[in-house]
């Protein structure tokens, strides 16, 4: 594989993309990529488009071929497709998400930035955590066998996640963007929702629309079937654990601050 980068430095996913682009070119032109001319590349791109290959896929393949050959081929502009998901689409996706439920629900509540979240951020005053997202993450922690204990917090029954058996500085979900996009397409197909342009950007648009429509992350979560912790039957005297200062307190995830 001739690339400007050392092949050993490429990720497994990138190596697969290089192999796909190379095979696509050589199947059409019946010649090695290294011997390609400018005219060859134009013929190949035309063949891809006639086969219905998406514009951004053609662009990605061309970037790879250009990297291999060193040809000064101009990349076409990147396509920006904005797709909206209805509340019904979101509910159907959540209903079939299964083991992917926690990160998918959190993305709808708080946006794609949740993949940067560490366990310790749940109790950091600098990072606001909607109560609906917090309860989803607690359920994820319990499913992994992490220890939790319940207590009352501002009228909500919540659970404290005990950092035994894991590093609080670890990310809650350790998924690469391409893996998230792959799973999103699978979830969409299982839910009977079109997988066209189904990716993290689409979920970000859905998150922003939910905030604009309902005004707050927890209200949006309830509207799409993500129930926050239920109110206790008997009201208790407020006694706040200072370590939970950031949970459900500030309004960073409200339309007024979005």
Image (cartoon, helix red, strand yellow):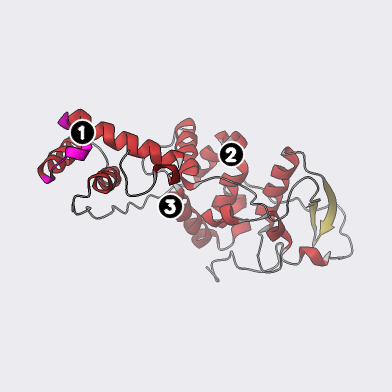
In the image, which residues are magenta? 29-38
Tag 1 secondary structure: loop
Residue drawn at (86%, 59%), measured in percent from left and top?
A: 235
Q: Is residue 156 left or right of residue 130?
A: right
Q: Is residue 195 visible?
A: no
Could you tell which of marks 2 and 1 lies nearer the N-terminus? 1
Q: What residue is shown at x 79% (from left), y 62% (from top)?
A: 154
Asked if the residues shown at circle 2 and circle 1 are in contact, with their CB atoms under 8 angstroms apart, the answer is: no
Disc 1 crowd, CA 10 A, few/some/many (<14, 14-19, 20+): few
Q: Residue 238 or 195: which is nearer the viewer?
A: 195
Residue placed under numbered mark 2 in the picture: 100
Crowding near pointer 3: few (<14 within 10 Å), some, many (20+)?
some
Residue 57: image location, x then y, percent: 30, 43
| Residue 158 x, y percent position in the rendering | 79, 52
Mark sitting earlier along the chain (1/3): 1
Q: Which residue is mark 1?
A: 32
Image depth: mark 2 or mark 1 in front: 1
* Mark-to-mark CA distance, 2 and 1: 41 Å
Residue 37: quarter of image: top left
Judging depth in this view, the residue of 65 and 45 nearest the camera is 65
- Asked if disc 3 and disc 2 are in contact, CB closer than 8 Å, the reply is no
């Amino acid at each position: 594989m001739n690339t400007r980068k050392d092949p050993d430095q490429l990720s497994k996913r990138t190596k697969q993309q290089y192999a796909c682009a190379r095979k696509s070119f050589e199947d059409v032109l019946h010649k090695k990529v290294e011997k390609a001319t400018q005219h060859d590349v134009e013929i190949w791109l035309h063949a891809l488009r006639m086969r219905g290959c998406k514009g951004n896929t053609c662009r990605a393949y061309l970037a790879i071929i250009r990297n291999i050959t060193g040809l000064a081929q101009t990349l076409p502009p990147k396509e920006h497709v904005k797709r909206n998901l209805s509340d019904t689409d979101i509910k159907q996706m959540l209903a079939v998400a299964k083991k992917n439920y926690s990160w998918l629900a959190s993305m709808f509540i708080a946006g794609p930035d949740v993949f940067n979240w560490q366990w310790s951020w749940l109790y950091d005053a600098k990072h606001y955590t909607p109560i609906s997202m917090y309860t989803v993450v607690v359920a994820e922690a319990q499913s992994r066998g992490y220890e939790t204990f319940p207590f009352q917090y501002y009228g909500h029954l919540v659970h404290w996640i005990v950092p035994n058996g894991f590093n609080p500085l670890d990310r809650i979900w350790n998924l690469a963007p391409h893996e998230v996009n792959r799973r999103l397409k699978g979830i969409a197909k299982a839910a009977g929702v079109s997988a066209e342009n189904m990716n993290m950007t689409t979920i970000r648009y859905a998150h922003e629309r939910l905030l604009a429509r309902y005004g707050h992350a927890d209200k949006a979560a309830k509207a799409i079937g993500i129930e926050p912790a239920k109110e206790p039957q008997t009201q208790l005297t407020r006694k706040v654990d200072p370590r939970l200062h950031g949970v459900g307190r500030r309004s960073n995830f409200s339309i007024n601050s979005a």
